């Protein structure tokens, strides 16, 4: 009986708490929705005040952008597989006969621009070709999404990285104004990456170059500008001309775990890595900054030492598999190209 009275007394109290938290939830939802609704207005205010855009023009332009549910779906995190695709399977996506042969043809067609880029920026032709081969299959798959649609969708309707994409939208509007481009017509990836070399708008503004001297930076249809821009990107990120990229190595078995715990950046001297158990027999000085790389082959895990140039490749995509794919594709294209010259 006492328990029954307790429950009867408790019920109104629980209901009051329930109504209280429900009200708080509704208020928070309303605040969130309001924040999303006014965020584009705040963005426009900033563009007007900081960069002198016409408010009416910018309002009309953003109203023309379409929110693409497919982009949000593509960007949304997916459940991760229990184990990432091993290197030996990932490798086959990019290192196959068709992509290598197409890379050789791209090199032959653009040999003059590639020689000029190598002379200007110190980046070997094969690495420029390989990046373009991995990113857009030599310019044949540059993306079919409106860049404006993608960036507006991700700036105001995708909370996960909204700040980043609003910054990229800002850069996009500035670059199209500065370059005299129509922001409604440019196409790219669902994340807003553009052109033959897949530059985000901020990268375009920092690293794209007018490599053929026609007064325009055209990375969408001009191979020469795209080649120069990729080479400049590498150069500005610290490419070291004539230096190694990555070299196979051995490791003391009891040192593997410690080496794998190091940062993914060339901030350790070879001497330091050797002290930690690296069995490297290369010619680089002991003071050379390096990083430890492991990748799963069909015969088991293999190990490499990556140097500054390997790290530069990862500035395109922070993935050891990606960087290795670019490196090995570059080596194979270079080897076969030399045979037919």
Image: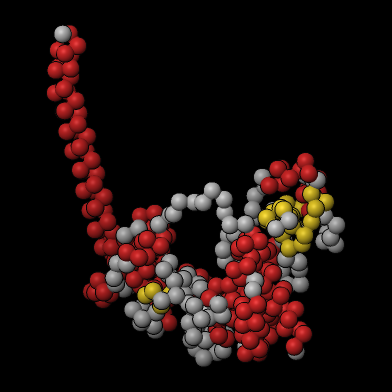
Q: In the rendered view, tell whether residue 144 sits above or below residue 38.
A: below
* Residue 231 visible in rendering: no
Q: In the rendered view, tell whether residue 272 sits above or below residue 115.
A: above
Residue 267 drawn at (x, y percent): 69, 53
* Residue 87 visible in rendering: yes
Which residue extends farthest front?
Answer: 298
Q: In the image, what residue occupies the spot 61% across and 63% down? A: 90
Image quadrant where residue 73 sits: bottom left
Observer-nearest residue: 10 or 120? Answer: 10
Residue 194 drawn at (x, y percent): 46, 75
Q: In the image, what residue occupies the spot 20% across and 37% down? A: 22
Observer-nearest residue: 207 or 280? Answer: 280
Residue 55 drawn at (x, y percent): 25, 72
Image quadrant where residue 24 sits: top left
Q: Which image quarter holds the N terminus?
A: top left
Residue 79 drawn at (x, y percent): 45, 51
Q: In the image, what residue occupies the spot 37% across and 75% down? A: 146
Which residue extends farthest top?
Answer: 2
| Left or right: 237, with 256 as reference point | left
Count of picture labels: 0
């Amino acid at each position: 009986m006492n328990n029954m009275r307790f429950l009867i007394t408790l019920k109104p109290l629980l209901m009051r708490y329930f109504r209280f938290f429900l009200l708080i939830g509704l208020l928070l939802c309303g605040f969130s929705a309001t924040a999303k609704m006014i965020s584009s207005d705040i963005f426009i205010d900033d563009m007007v005040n900081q960069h002198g855009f016409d408010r009416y023009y910018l309002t009309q332009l953003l109203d023309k952008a379409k929110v693409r549910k497919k982009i949000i779906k593509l960007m949304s995190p997916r459940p991760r597989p229990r184990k990432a695709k091993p290197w030996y399977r990932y490798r086959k996506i990019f290192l196959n006969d068709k992509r290598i042969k197409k890379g050789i043809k791209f090199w032959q067609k653009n040999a003059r621009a590639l020689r000029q880029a190598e002379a200007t920026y110190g980046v070997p032709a094969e690495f420029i070709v390989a990046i373009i081969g991995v990113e857009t299959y030599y310019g044949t798959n540059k993306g079919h999404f409106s860049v404006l649609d993608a960036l507006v969708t991700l700036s105001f309707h995708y909370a996960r990285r909204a700040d980043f994409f609003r910054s990229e939208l800002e850069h996009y509007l500035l670059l199209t104004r500065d370059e005299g481009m129509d922001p409604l017509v440019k196409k790219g990836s669902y994340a807003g990456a553009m052109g033959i070399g897949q530059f985000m708008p901020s990268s375009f503004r920092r690293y794209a170059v007018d490599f053929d001297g026609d007064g325009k930076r055209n990375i969408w249809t001009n191979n020469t500008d795209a080649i120069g821009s990729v080479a400049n990107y590498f150069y500005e990120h610290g490419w070291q001309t004539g230096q190694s990229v990555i070299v196979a190595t051995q490791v003391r078995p009891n040192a593997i775990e410690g080496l794998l715990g190091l940062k993914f950046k060339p901030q350790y001297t070879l001497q330091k890595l050797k002290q930690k158990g690296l069995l490297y027999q290369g010619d680089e000085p002991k003071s050379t900054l390096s990083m430890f790389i492991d990748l799963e082959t069909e015969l088991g895990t293999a190990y490499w030492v990556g140097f500054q140039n390997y790290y530069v490749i990862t500035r395109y995509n922070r993935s050891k598999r990606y960087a290795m794919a670019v490196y090995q594709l570059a080596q194979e294209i270079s080897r076969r190209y030399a045979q037919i010259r």
